[in-house]
Amino acid sequence: MQKPFKIADIDIDKINYGNIRGTSKKYINIRYDENRLFFQTPELLNINKPIKKNGYFELEIPLYGKSSKKVQELISFLNALDEKFIKDCKTNASTWFKNVNTVKYKSIIREIDDKNDIYENGILKLKIITGSNGTMVTNNGNQISPNELKPNTHIKMILECFGLWITNSSFGLYLRPILIDQREIKKQVIKFIEESDEDNILETEIENDDAPLDISRMNNIVIPDETDDNKNYININRT
């Protein structure tokens, strides 16, 4: 069974594309050499409840986590993907698009209008597909329903760069969550040595195990509709 790639080991130039599928709403599969492109995220802080939609849940995840270094590595990787897809769009414009001179690209990282520092680096907006062929959601390794994902927990994910969705005037990456593992933020109570009539108590977070996630099953692919409701676009002139 294929394991997820480490972000540091992914060579962006090895990403290639399959044939175009569809007509008015087109889709192009993404491959990495001959493999699917899975990668594992660091632990990110989830502060939102999933929003139930028609056939899936939508979850906005801030790019904020326990290790700022690892989060920045993830951000740099996602930005590099943006640059790759924009470059390849210019090269393949005559094939991907018809009768347009300008198209819009929807960035992977979405900006959010909120003064909370947690949103400073933007968010990932993911669609969690329900059902037996959907995203696997677990809590410390035990399978749960997507609606059991709770705010103020850490989540670690395996994401797949599944393909590019393309309309007549816009395109973007379908970033498919394969596995989402919720990890409770545990606290430990530490007491000072008693030197007075009052005990001082200090709470500290326990670092969770940062071991790799395992994919226990490979799911069939369900492609949700993409909407054109986000203003975070990059204009690309067709050449």
Image: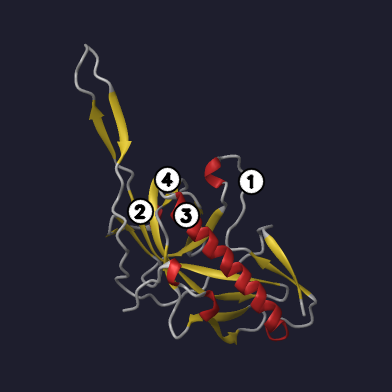
Q: Eyeballing the image, is 231 above or below 3?
A: above
Which of pointers 4 and 2 lies earlier in the amino acid sequence? 4
According to the picture, the residue beneath numbered tag 3 turns out to be 71
According to the picture, the residue beneath numbered tag 1 turns out to be 113
Considering every residue shown, the one lying at the far left of the view is 194
Question: Residue 182, which numbered label?
Answer: 2
Which of pointers 3 and 4 lies earlier in the amino acid sequence? 3
According to the picture, the residue beneath numbered tag 4 turns out to be 151
Question: Residue 11, which numbered label?
Answer: none
Q: Quadrant of the C terminus?
A: bottom right
Considering every residue shown, the one lying at the far top of the view is 197
**Residue type (three-letter) at the residue carrying disc 1:** Asp
Q: Eyeballing the image, is 11 above or below 155?
A: below
**Residue type (three-letter) at the residue carrying disc 4:** Pro
**Front label number (4 vs 1):** 1
Q: Is residue 219 found left or right of 168 in the rendered image?
A: left
Q: Distance between the residues labelled 4 and 2?
A: 10 Å
Q: Residue at x 60, y 56 (%)?
A: 110
SS category of the residue bearing label 1: loop
SS category of the residue bearing label 3: helix
**Front label number (1 vs 3):** 3
Q: Is residue 223 found left or right of 66 in the rendered image?
A: right
**Residue type (three-letter) at the residue carrying disc 2:** Gln
Q: Distance between the residues labelled 2 and 1?
A: 26 Å
**Residue type (three-letter) at the residue carrying disc 3:** Val
Give neighbour class at mark 3: few <14, some 14-19, many 20+ (Cα, 10 Å). some
Which of pointers 3 and 2 lies earlier in the amino acid sequence? 3
Q: Do the residues labelled 3 and 2 touch (CB within 8 Å)?
A: no
Q: In the rendering, at what x and y percent does residue 211 appear? A: 29, 60
SS category of the residue bearing label 2: strand
State whether residue 59 appears in this view: no
